[in-house]
Amino acid sequence: MNYEILFKELKNSTEVIRSLLTGISQEEAQIKPTPEAWSILEVTCHLFDEEREDFREHLDFILHRQNEEWHVIHPKEWVTERKYNEQSFAEMRERFFAERLKSLEWLKGLADTDWETTYTSEYGSVSAGEMFACWVAHDNLHIRQLVELRRAYIERITQPYPIGYAGDW
């Protein structure tokens, strides 16, 4: 694993997410393409909670808090429990980017970390390198999701005109 490359990827994905969340109104952010799909607002709230309660927190457990108990998270349940789709999109977007900035600043201090350091709990074992790699991959997963949500929005607003000429989706 190359720390510098993964750190750069996390910084870059932050800017991609920022771009994907630009120009979205509260109403647009709350649109769910299907009842079971997430809205842009729900993705944004999820990213915020994951930033605070999962990746940075759990990487810190692995590296600095081996004697503490790993806390369980419930991201799928949080969507309804925390009423994600009722939140202020502008506020949640800003809160996510503020947390991401904290994360990036914190990560700068980890350049010389032993990425093989592993935390073992009743939920299994995970190394610091694996957690950092998953953090970067998690951004990519939600970038793809946001792109798909933006595409669904484009399909709605371009009606009655077909957009097939743009290429296969």
Image (tube, grey):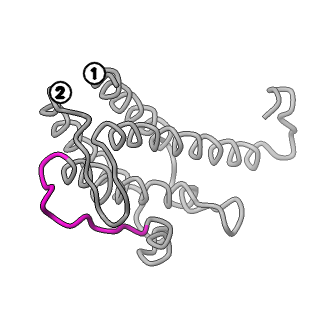
User: Which residue is depicted at the point 68% across and 42% down?
Assistant: 151
Residue 122 painted magenta: no
The amino acid on which the numbered mark 2 sits, given as a three-letter code, is: Ala
Q: Compare residues 27 and 126 and report the one nearer the observer.
A: 126
Residue 95 lies left or right of residue 37; in this view the side is: left
- Percent across and percent down for residue 83 are 45, 74
Q: Which residues are magenta?
A: 63-74
Q: Please give the residue where the numbered disc 1 appears in the rendered image.
A: 4
Where 152 falls versus 12 (above or below)?
below
Q: Earlier in the sequence, mark 2 or mark 1?
A: 1
Residue 88, quarter of the rendered image: bottom left
The amino acid on which the numbered mark 1 sits, given as a three-letter code, is: Glu
Residue 159, numbered circle: none
Where 43 falls versus 108 (above or below)?
below
Residue 90 lies left or right of residue 127; in this view the side is: right
Residue 151 lies left or right of residue 51; in this view the side is: right
User: Which residue is depicted at the point 13% across and 55% down?
Assistant: 65
Mark 2: few/some/many CA within 10 Å (<14, 14-19, 20+): few
Is disc 2 in contact with disc 1, using a CB cutoff of under 8 Å?
Answer: yes
User: Which residue is depicted at the point 35% across and 33% down?
Assistant: 10
Magenta part, dominant SS: loop
Residue 111, numbered circle: 2
Secondary element under disc 2, as helix, strand or loop, is loop
Residue 66 painted magenta: yes
